[in-house]
Amino acid sequence: MTTTRRRAGKSKDIFEEDGKTFFEFTDRTTAFDGIKKDEFPHKGEVCCRLSAYWFEILEKEGIPTHFRAFVPPNIMEVEPLEIIPIEVIWRNFVAGSILKRHERGESLTVEIEPRLGARIPGGMIEFTTKFEEKDRPIDEQEILDNGWLTPDELDYIRECTRLTNDIMSGRLLERGIILADFKIEFGRDRNAAERILLADEVGTPDGCRFWDLDSYKQGVIESLDKDVYRYEKGDLSDVYLRIQRRICG
Ligand code: TMP
Ligand code: ASP
């Protein structure tokens, strides 16, 4: 049996064993393009469990994903892909970088009410670069000009992202959780480049903003995600274990 391992990202390792590809979700945590760095117990396990949970649901709903199998507690077998070098962000509510960009007077694709927690009617999609030192917002024309996607593929990704939002938002609401925004990534099947799959991780507190619905109704934003680490609002391990229990037991 041969195992080759490399550090795939800031929080995950990737390894190959017996011709199969695996993601190991680690406890490494970073924020603000790696400016903050720490490790928190249970973090890898929570993100792996939640990703496996959502990938299975999304597959059943007709979204092809790279998920193959969950190997508890923190490993996932995946289909090896060529990653498309963009991050896709869906926003239902105003938070994070969009508010900062608005405050700096940058142009946005959708007009927003510039207030943390304001709803964005109909939601909105945004794109950033992936492999640059800092993730940079890019528009659809730049994605096409760079040849990263064809117009049809861009439509497909928009549709998949909207559907992913609908599926996750609905299920979360039933559990008293608001999905304020999230980031997802896509890749191409190595043997059939035209086949685009949902990649990386999905529906985790690393890649989503989750807000407690009851608190929101009382005018308070209670973060159940990595914002507790970004803005030092609580213990990441506690919050991650709590959100995992609320979503998938
Ligand atoms: P943002 O408001 O900082 O642009 O983040 C939007 C959403 O995307 C939020 O749920 C966090 C997630 N995200 C990532 O998963 N990785 C990243 O590198 C960034 C910048 C955001
Ligand atoms: N994931 C990014 C980082 O590691 C940004 C963030 O989530 O704040 O820096």
Image: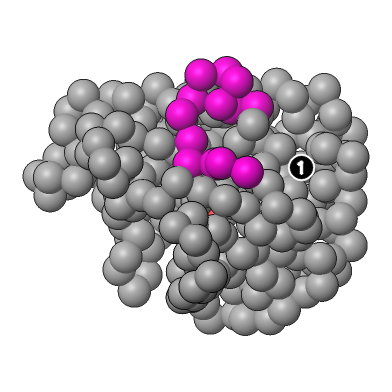
In the picture, measured across the screen, residue 203 lies left or right of residue 140, that is: right
Magenta part of the chain: 57-69
**SS at badge 1:** strand
Residue 30 in magenta stretch: no
| 107 or 169, nearer to the observer | 169
Category of crowding for the residue at label 1, using alpha-carbon neighbours closer than 10 angstroms: few (below 14), some (14–19), many (at least 20): many
| 216 or 211, nearer to the observer | 211
Query: Horizontal and vertical percent for residue 105?
Result: 36, 54
State whether residue 233 appears in this view: no
Q: Is residue 125 above or below residue 99?
A: above
In the picture, measured across the screen, residue 24 lies left or right of residue 172, that is: left
Q: Is residue 55 above or below residue 242?
A: above
Q: Which residue is labeled 1 in the image?
A: 211
Three-letter amino acid code at the position of disc 1: Trp
Residue in view at x 28 percent, y 24 percent: 155
Residue 64 in magenta stretch: yes
Residue 240 lies in what quarter of the image? bottom right
Q: Is residue 162 above or below residue 186?
A: above
Query: Horizontal and vertical percent for residue 178?
Result: 73, 34
